[in-house]
Image: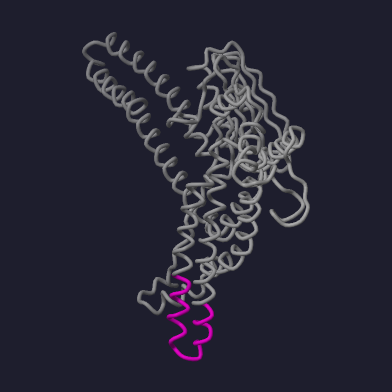
Amino acid sequence: MAMDYGRDYGRAEARRAHRVPAVLRAPLEGRTWREFLYLLLSLPMAVLTFSFAVTMTTAGVAMLITFVGVPVLAAALVGVRALGAVERARARSLLKLEISEPEPVRAPNGKRGLMPWVGALLKSGVSWRHVLYALLHLPWAIGAFTVSVVMWSVGWALFLYPAYWWMYPTWWGQPGMQIGAEPGHGAGLFVDNPFEIGVTCAAGLALVLATPWVIRGLASVDRLMVSALLGPSRLAERVWELEEDRGVVVDTAAADLRRIERDLHDGAQARLVALAMDLGLAKEKLEEDPEAAARMVDEAHGEVKLALQELRDLARGIHPAILTDRGLGPALSALAARCTVPVQAEVDLPARPAAAIEGIAYFTVSELLQNISKHSGARSARVDVWHSSGRLMLQVWDDGRGGASTAGGSGLAGLAERLGSVDGLLVVDSPEGGPTTVTAELPWRG
């Protein structure tokens, strides 16, 4: 998982640009109205879902003494799952809740047919969580509907009272709004003078300003219920995450193999082929023109040196020997020395991490330093590596032009995917104009 701090920084600037405080904006914001509409629609949806779930489930359980109960109970579970899909769509649209679809019903061991599928449906924890949601949501929806509608209607009625106060003596034959008794029955307080009207308006304003935050609190409970009961299980989410990570690892390994093959073919292999041809020509000229043969052998010797250097660079790109022999500190110091920008490297680790984590940390720093050399325009950089709370932390800072982002398929996006494949995290903080700070977090495996 990676965060684009550049975009978050822009959002923060936009929020600061608001001159109206949030408490005054909240009653008119789209979020408030969407969540209020969600709470209004929750009551009829909860009644429908509760009625269907209770009726069908009770009928199915009651008829389990006969075979008829099994298909009835299966139909109940299919129905509540369908209603759950509607609830998820409603939450996505009005609550802006990003929730994945739960895992589908699959018969065990790849069996096919209606009865294995029905058996899997009856054993599915997701299906029964939908039933539990139907039972729990109705009482909550009644309470949330009542609180939100009462606060909203009373708040606006009191706040706007000065605008329609004149209707009471003109059309309804009383001096003003009656408080403390039923209208037209018994003595009560009539709100009819300027002071009382002002106090009523102020109380309504306070209620209007408080209502959006109450609505947001109620909607937050709905978010929790939908996520916990209608979404995928934690195990399923973890399986999907591991499947995605496995795909990233496979793609990365394939890309690395293609890069190594390309480098060998275009570099050392082509140079060695030319070397073999030169040595063949030198062998033919050895008797006819010894001086020319000596020159060709000397040129071939230079080609051998270049081929060896290319092979060393390629081997360093696969896994540098200094990392294996001496660890992360000396390896990063060697990286810093080769960078075109002055880099200060500091490694403070209690011990060497596992070889796989050590290698990922090394290549993460290597790629970040390459980005600094090529794109940042920086005059200095710093690399810090330390251990904290069971995690390997590394941070690369530079004073370049900034604007780095993990969006748009950039190299940082690929780096974030590689770290994510081992439960790592990449955070980029790079405002325009700099400086840029990239923080990576990896699991510590000693």
Residue 58 visible in rendering:
yes
Residue in the foreground of this view, choosing between 101 and 423: 101
Question: In the image, is residue 300 above or below residue 237?
Answer: above
Prevalent SS, magenta region: helix
Residue 215 visible in rendering:
no
Residue in the foreground of this view, choosing between 415 and 317: 415
Question: In the image, is residue 56 above or below residue 392?
Answer: below
Q: Is residue 225 left or right of residue 116?
A: right
Question: In the image, is residue 337 above or below residue 203?
Answer: above
Point 52% across, 16% down: residue: 376
Q: Is residue 85 left or right of residue 440?
A: left
Q: Is residue 156 left or right of residue 68?
A: right
Residue in the foreground of this view, choosing between 9 and 343: 9
Q: Magenta stretch: residue 115 in it?
A: no
* Image coordinates for residue 212, horizontal then vertical, percent: 64, 42
Residue in the foreground of this view, choosing between 325 and 128: 128
* Image coordinates for residue 359, horizontal then vertical, percent: 57, 37
Task: Provide the residue span drawn in magenta.
Answer: 57-78
Quarter of the N terminus within the rendering: top right
Q: Magenta stretch: residue 60 in it?
A: yes
* Image coordinates for residue 103, horizontal then vertical, percent: 47, 61
Point 36% across, 25% down: residue: 267
